[in-house]
Amino acid sequence: QEIAAALTQASDLLQSGDAATAQAIFAQVLEHDPANAAAYAGIIRTLLAVGDTVKAKHMLASAPPDMVKDKAFDTVRAALDLADQAAAAGPMADLQAKIITNPKDFQARYDLALAYVAANQREAAVDALLEIIRMNRGWNEEAERKQLVKLFDAFGHTVPLTISARKRLSSILFS
């Protein structure tokens, strides 16, 4: 029960932006329970939060094979995938300029969403993808909706941003 409370506290701290304290708590849990997948995945999430994707990838690759099958690693894999995509998105200012010039440049809007992810501007990323759906549902074989689902996986399904974005998505799809 203490471990569950510590994991919850660490996750809350990570959500609020205190990756260092969250990482310390996850590490303490791992010290007491070396097979705790949630704590191991939590440490990787803290590395991603501070932009250390190289160390995060190394830690994931070093994780015991049985551990990486745990559901806690779904978020980690989604976040790493997003980090890779975001790294290739391009300069944010250039993408914003393209959208100002042509609001229907959906590829630029999509790439901007990835750039927002790279800059840890989650809400802006969600907004950009929802705007594509609103303007041109089904663009590029629904790449924007699929990317939004990846964001939800990476953020976690119970965080307020995911919950509100799902509601906004539903209102767009069913209006």
Image (spheres, helix red, strand yellow):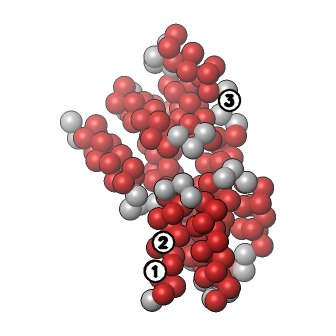
Q: Give above or below for 124 relative to 29.
A: above
Kind of residue at badge 1: Ala
Residue found at x 53% / y 40%: 121
Query: Which quadrant, please, contains the N terminus?
Result: bottom left
The residue labelled by disc 3 is 90
| Residue 128 vs residue 123, the one in the foreground | 123
Residue 139, horizontal then vertical, whole percent: 45, 31
Q: CA distance from mark 3 to mark 2?
A: 35 Å
Kind of residue at badge 2: Gln
Q: Residues within 10 Å of mark 1 (few under 14, many from 20)?
A: few
Residue 105, horizontal then vertical, whole percent: 51, 20
Left or right: 104 as drawn, with respect to 95: left
Residue 3, horizontal then vertical, whole percent: 52, 85
**Residue 69 appears in the figure:** no
The numbered dot on residue 5 is: 1
Pointer 3 or 2: first along the chain = 2
Q: CA distance from mark 3 to mark 1?
A: 40 Å
Q: CA distance from mark 2 to mark 1?
A: 6 Å
Circles 3 and 1, Cβ within 8 Å, touching? The answer is no
For marks 3 and 2, give the one nearer the viewer.
2
Badge 3 marks a residue whose secondary structure is loop
Badge 2 marks a residue whose secondary structure is helix
Badge 1 marks a residue whose secondary structure is helix
Q: Give above or below for 103 relative to 81.
A: above
Q: Residues within 10 Å of mark 2 (few under 14, many from 20)?
A: some
Circles 2 and 1, Cβ within 8 Å, touching? The answer is yes
| Residue 34 vs residue 21, the one in the foreground | 21
Q: Give above or below for 108 relative to 162.
A: above
